[in-house]
Image: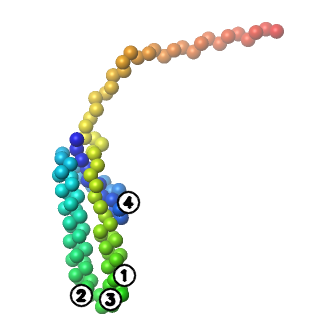
Amino acid sequence: MKWMLVVLVGGMTPVNTDLVFDKFADCLAAEEQMRKHYTDAFEAWDRWAAANIERRREYTKVRDLQAKRLLSNIGTCVPHAGSDPTPPQKQSNPTPPQAAPAPQPSPKT
């Protein structure tokens, strides 16, 4: 079975990455690497913001927004839909379609 990495933007909206892995462990490793990149990006931004934003109150507000933007994206591994082709199923003992009964003439009164 193959696995695909899907990112949940904001923890809710799934985005297909088209990254397909043969092993589940490889997919999990890619998710962990993605999470590390987001964390590194946030930490780099945080260092810049701490040095460049003069007002502490503004820094705190902006930092919270940036943390939500970057750190709420999570990855998950899902089975790849096209990974295991299933053979067409054979019908066992197919029953022929039954003909509809012939209409009966209406009784004469």
Residue 61 marker: 1
What SS does tag 4 mark?
A: loop
Coordinates of residue 105 in the picture (x, y in percent): 70, 10
Q: What amino acid is found at the position of numbered circle 1 in the picture?
A: Lys
Q: What amino acid is found at the position of numbered circle 3 in the picture?
A: Arg
Q: What amino acid is found at the position of numbered circle 4 in the picture?
A: Met
Coordinates of residue 96 in the picture (x, y in percent): 45, 14
Coordinates of residue 25 in the picture (x, y in percent): 18, 51
Q: Quadrant of the N terminus?
A: top left
Q: Quadrant of the C terminus?
A: top right
Q: Is residue 98 visible?
A: yes
Residue at image mark 4: 12
Coordinates of residue 60 in the picture (x, y in percent): 34, 83
Residue contact between numbered discs 1 and 4, judged by CB atoms under 8 Å: no
Q: Quadrant of residue 70?
A: bottom left
In front of the other: 26 or 106: 26
Is 95 positioned to the left or the right of 104 in the image? Answer: left
Residue at image mark 3: 56
Q: Quadrant of residue 66?
A: bottom left
**Dot 2 alpha-carbon crowd within 10 angstroms: few under 14, some 14 to 19, many 20 or more:** few
Residue contact between numbered discs 2 and 1, judged by CB atoms under 8 Å: no
Q: CA distance from mark 3 to mark 2?
A: 11 Å
The tag earlier along the polypeptide, 3 or 2, is 2
